[in-house]
């Protein structure tokens, strides 16, 4: 499963920016707008990393960090507009793993997230590059190749990315809106019918290669999910 990241910030624009870029990088994202909600989600959902703003309503970021460190070693990267040295020192002394000041570079932040996760991942636990499914379905992310029963499929970029997204979230229902955001891009101006058309084409290609390879299910009124288990 992809790493789960909890984004805690009371600025909606910052939350949206971070959530979009994290999902594009194939992380699972949770969001909280205040410290109390952050603590609740952290205890209930067990995130793999927390991006924590310092200035928060209800409970501030330093207190959230202090509370979490009583019984959790979850990696924490503090993000704040307050760049004074004393705040950085206090945050790190309370157990934060890294500290980034606003305005920040998204590219730099993503690199820091990867570095922190790399430190806490078990040695040799690399991100999945090959995904499999029924009927001999196999997607190689690094080579950008899809085969069914050892026969290569000539998929478009969009079809490949759509299949990858479904395989990455096998068993989970993905809404049409989520698929538009992840596969087509945040600035896509079309409607959700584009998702239905693309899924229809992809399912036809999989089914033509092997009847069991079409493991994509429509969830009426919501979106699609992929069942990786053999029939």
Image (cartoon, rainbow, N blue to C red):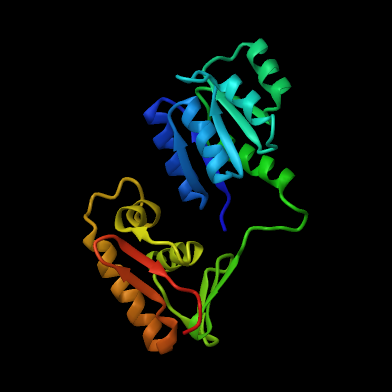
Q: How many marks?
A: 0
Pick the quarter of the image with the N terminus.
bottom right
Left or right, 17 with reference to 65:
left
Camera sees residue 18: no
Image quadrant assignment for residue 176: bottom left
Whole-percent x and y of residue 162?
Answer: 40, 64
> Please, is residue 167 above or below residue 94 in the view?
below
Left or right, 123 with reference to 114:
right
Question: At 46% from the left edge and 20% from the top edge, which residue is drawn?
Answer: 58
Image quadrant assignment for residue 154: bottom left
> Please, is residue 124 above or below residue 86 in the view?
below
Camera sees residue 33: yes
Whole-percent x and y of residue 163?
Answer: 43, 68
Q: Residue furthest right?
A: 123
Whole-percent x and y of residue 47?
Answer: 57, 44
Q: Nearer the viewer, residue 58 or 98?
A: 58
Q: Nearer the viewer, residue 69 or 82?
A: 69
Question: At 67% from the left edge and 10% from the top edge, which residue is drawn?
Answer: 86
Left or right, 225 with reference to 105:
left
> Please, is residue 228 above or below residue 148 in the view?
above
Question: At 35% from the left edge and 75% from the top edge, which residue is drawn?
Answer: 202
Q: Nearer the viewer, residue 62 or 80?
A: 62
Question: At 40% from the left edge and 25% from the top edge, which residue is drawn?
Answer: 11
Whole-percent x and y of residue 91?
Answer: 66, 20
> Please, is residue 82 above or below residue 49 in the view?
above
């Amino acid at each position: 499963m992809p790493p789960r990241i909890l984004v805690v910030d009371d600025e909606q624009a910052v939350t949206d920016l971070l959530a979009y870029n994290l999902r594009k990088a194939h992380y699972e994202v949770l969001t909280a707008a205040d410290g109390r909600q952050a603590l609740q989600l952290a205890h209930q959902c067990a995130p793999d990393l927390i991006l924590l703003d310092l200035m928060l309503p209800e409970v501030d970021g330093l207190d959230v960090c202090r509370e979490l460190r009583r019984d959790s070693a979850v990696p924490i990267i503090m993000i704040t507009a307050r760049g004074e040295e004393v705040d950085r020192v206090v945050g790190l002394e309370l157990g934060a793993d890294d500290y980034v000041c606003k305005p920040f570079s998204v590219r730099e932040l993503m690199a820091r997230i990867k570095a922190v996760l790399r430190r806490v991942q078990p040695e040799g636990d690399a991100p999945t590059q090959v995904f499999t499914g029924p009927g001999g379905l196999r997607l190689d992310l690094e080579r950008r190749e899809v085969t069914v029963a050892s026969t290569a499929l000539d998929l478009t970029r969009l079809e490949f990315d759509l299949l990858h997204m479904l395989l990455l979230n096998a068993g989970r229902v993905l809404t049409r809106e989520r698929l538009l955001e992840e596969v087509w891009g945040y600035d896509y101006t079309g409607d959700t019918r584009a998702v239905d058309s693309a899924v229809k084409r992809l399912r036809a290609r999989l089914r033509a290669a092997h009847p069991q390879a079409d493991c994509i299910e429509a969830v009426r009124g919501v979106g699609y999910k992929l069942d990786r288990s053999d029939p």
